[in-house]
């Protein structure tokens, strides 16, 4: 059997001991101790961006599909909604989502997370930009994204879509009634 491991997390001044080869250094973070060291050992912990990356990728796909459908309602081969205000409302909502920014935030806009608006009004996504933003300031990324009920992009997006889709007075309901 080996000697007892001792460690201090984030210069807290509190020495913690472990009698096994694993040590819990924070809630949900366990390290495997592989060798003894007389000096400090630095451990960097990052969170996975894969869930957020997958969600942003799915958002881009859905956004671009919606943009394509709205665009079909313009021009010489316009669809059944041509000339109706709902087309303009939907176009403005999509534009607002694509250009969302949070004043005062360390994340200036969706482009900081890897979402870019091209000349055709479609979004593209670079996961590497998201990873870079998350590594440099993950709390700012989380704050910018927000939650459906407490601010950030998610709350703004849900409110914008609710305005369009509201079953009582939304743009879609108004177009159906008109």
Image: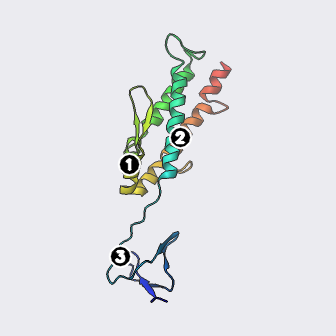
Q: Label 2, on which residue?
A: 58
Q: Residues within 10 Å of mark 3 (few under 14, many from 20)?
A: few
Residue 85: x and y, percent?
55, 20
* Label located before the other in sequence (1 or 3): 3
Residue at 57 percent across and 23 percent down: it is 86
Secondary structure under tag 1 reads: loop
* Label located before the other in sequence (2 or 3): 3
Q: Mark 2 or mark 3: which is in front?
A: 3
Quadrant in which the C terminus is drawn:
top right
Q: Label 3, on which residue?
A: 41
**Is residue 15 shown above or below 73?**
below
- Mark 2 and mark 1: Cα distance apart in space: 21 Å
Q: Mark 2 or mark 1: which is in front?
A: 2
Compare residues 142 and 27 and report the one nearer the observer.
Answer: 27
Asked if residue 111 can be seen in this view, the reply is yes
Residue 168: x and y, percent?
67, 31
Q: Mark 1 or mark 3: which is in front?
A: 3
* Label located before the other in sequence (2 or 1): 2
Secondary structure under tag 2 reads: helix
- Mark 1 and mark 3: Cα distance apart in space: 32 Å
Asked if residue 151 can be seen in this view, the reply is no
- 166 vs 17, left or right, is right
Residue 97: x and y, percent?
47, 36
Q: Label 1, on which residue?
A: 107
- 84 vs 26, left or right, is right
Q: Which disc number belongs to residue 38? A: none
Q: Residues within 10 Å of mark 2 (few under 14, many from 20)?
A: few
Secondary structure under tag 3 reads: loop
- 176 vs 22, left or right, is right
Farthest residue, direction front: 1
- Mark 2 and mark 3: Cα distance apart in space: 39 Å
């Amino acid at each position: 059997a080996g000697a007892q491991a001792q460690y201090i997390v984030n210069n807290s001044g509190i020495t913690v001991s472990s009698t096994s080869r694993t040590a819990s250094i924070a809630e949900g973070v366990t390290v495997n101790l592989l060798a003894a060291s007389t000096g400090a050992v630095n451990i960097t912990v990052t969170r996975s961006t894969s869930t957020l990356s997958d969600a942003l990728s799915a958002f881009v796909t859905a956004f671009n599909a919606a943009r394509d459908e709205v665009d079909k309602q313009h021009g010489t081969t316009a669809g059944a909604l041509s000339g109706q205000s709902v087309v303009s409302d939907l176009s403005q909502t999509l534009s607002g989502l694509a250009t969302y920014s949070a004043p005062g935030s360390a994340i200036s806009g969706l482009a900081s997370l890897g979402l870019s608006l091209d000349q055709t009004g479609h979004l593209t996504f670079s996961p590497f930009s998201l990873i870079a933003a998350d590594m440099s300031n993950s709390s700012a990324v989380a704050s910018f994204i927000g939650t459906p009920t407490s601010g950030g992009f998610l709350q703004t997006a849900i409110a914008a879509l609710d305005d369009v889709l509201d079953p009582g007075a939304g743009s879609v309901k108004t177009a159906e009634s008109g």
